[in-house]
Amino acid sequence: MLSQFEYYFMKFPKEIKVFVESVEWTFAKTMPKWPHEYIVRRNVSEEAFLTLVSFIRNHGFEAPYYDKTYIYFEDVGMVYWTMGAPLEETIIVNRCEKSNTYVERLKKGTLP
């Protein structure tokens, strides 16, 4: 993973940016108190999905979500993450606006 300084300047490479902007993200209706969207591996390009997951994990940062820690990657106000399963078992990539992350909501006192 990168240092905070290095991470600040890191953005998605063009091919990942094109992918995340071209796929249809699904709103997570079962978690209305935590607004976010997700994509499912079987519904998108396998190669692009694995590239996205690997990039998040290799270039992201650790941050808490209650008592758990996940690896997140922020690009242009959106934060992306998986649930931490091994790559071959990962089936979902999530994203939300930075303002809806646990850390930001904890700072603002707006946790559900």
Image: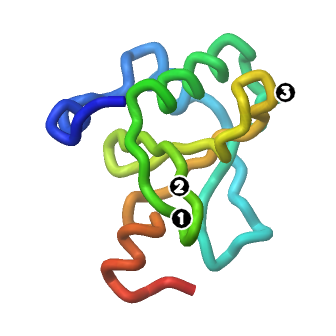
Judge by depth and name the residue closer to the eye, 47 or 25: 47
Residue 61, position in %: x, y? 38, 42
Q: Nearer the viewer, residue 50 or 62?
A: 62
Q: Residue furthest right?
A: 42
How would you rate the neighbour count of disc 3 (Cα within 10 Å): few for under 14, some for 14-19, many for 20 or more? Answer: few
Q: Residues within 10 Å of mark 2 (few under 14, many from 20)?
A: few
Picture residue at 57% right of the left edge, 17% below the top = 51
Say which quarter of the image contains residue 32.
bottom right
> Which residue is the site of mark 3?
42
Do residues under tags 3 and 2 come within 8 Å of each other at their CB atoms? Answer: no
The local crowd at label 1, few if under 14, some if 14 to 19, many if 20 or more residues have their Cα within 10 Å, is few
Q: CA distance from mark 1 to mark 2?
A: 6 Å
Q: Which residue is disc 2 drawn over?
A: 69
**In the image, residue 46 above or below residue 77:** above
Q: CA distance from mark 1 to mark 3?
A: 26 Å
| Residue 100 % position (x, y) | 46, 68
Residue 3, quarter of the rendered image: top left
Q: Secondary structure at mark 3?
A: helix
Q: Which mark is residue 65?
A: 1
Which amino acid type is shown beneath numbered disc 2? Thr
